Image (cartoon, grey):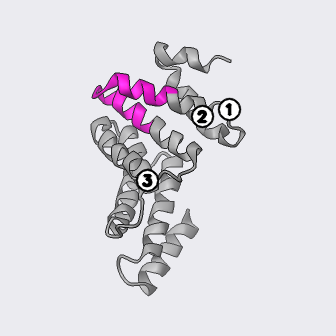
């Protein structure tokens, strides 16, 4: 983490404000912070990264929006999380890795369920994501994370039994 923060200092000192490399490092720090359960800091860094990237109409900021959504959910703000995750899903391209797309949609599903905005759609997004994530060897961590969430609800718990 210290290395990433030091790298950010260097980039901010040597690159123009709003440079994509600064945004990249901000997002990387946000991802580290999610893993360390420092959700408010993750939200701040990922939001700063998103604010830089959103000025580029060709950039699809689904990764930054996912991190923002994850942080918001962890902070108990599921309505805001759903809004950001809707944008993340909307920014996915047709050429996106289906595993990555499923992972992002699973987080939107969680947010829709937890916000009570649209439980039926949220549960369907989670079920659809599970069909992709469940059998992917490369997604062990994501699968464990999704299983932990799915175990909390009788409707999805049965899907996790193999």
> Quick one: label 3, few (<14), some, or many (20+) residues within 10 Å?
many
Q: Nearer the viewer, residue 78 or 124?
A: 124
Look at the image and tell me in which quarter the N terminus lies.
bottom right
Q: Residue furthest bottom?
A: 14
Say the numbered circle drawn on residue 162.
none
What residue span does the magenta drawing correspond to? Answer: 107-127
Identify the residue under disc 3: 62
The residue sitting at 53% across, 48% down in the picture is: 35
Main structural element of the magenta stretch: helix, strand or loop? helix
Q: Which residue is mark 2?
A: 132
Residue at 47% x, 74% y is 21
Left or right, 28 with respect to 110, comes to right
Q: In the structure shown, which secondary structural element does the residue marked by tag 1 occupy?
A: loop
Which of marks 3 and 2 precedes in the sequence? Answer: 3
- Distance of label 2 from label 3 (alpha carbons): 18 Å
Q: Which residue is mark 1?
A: 135
């Amino acid at each position: 983490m210290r290395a990433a923060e030091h790298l950010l200092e260097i980039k901010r000192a040597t690159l123009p404000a709003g440079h994509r490399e600064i945004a990249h490092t901000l997002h990387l720090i946000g991802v580290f912070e999610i893993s360390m359960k420092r959700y408010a800091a993750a939200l701040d860094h990922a939001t700063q990264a998103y604010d830089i990237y959103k000025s580029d109409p060709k950039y699809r900021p689904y990764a930054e929006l996912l991190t923002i959504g994850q942080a918001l959910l962890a902070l108990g703000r599921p309505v805001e999380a759903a809004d950001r995750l809707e944008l993340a899903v909307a920014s996915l391209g047709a050429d996106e890795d289906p595993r990555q797309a499923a992972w992002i949609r699973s987080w939107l599903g969680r947010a829709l369920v937890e916000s009570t905005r649209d439980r039926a759609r949220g549960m369907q997004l989670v079920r659809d994501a599970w069909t992709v994530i469940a059998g992917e060897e490369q997604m062990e961590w994501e699968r464990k994370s999704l299983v932990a969430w799915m175990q909390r609800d009788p409707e999805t718990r049965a899907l996790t039994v193999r």
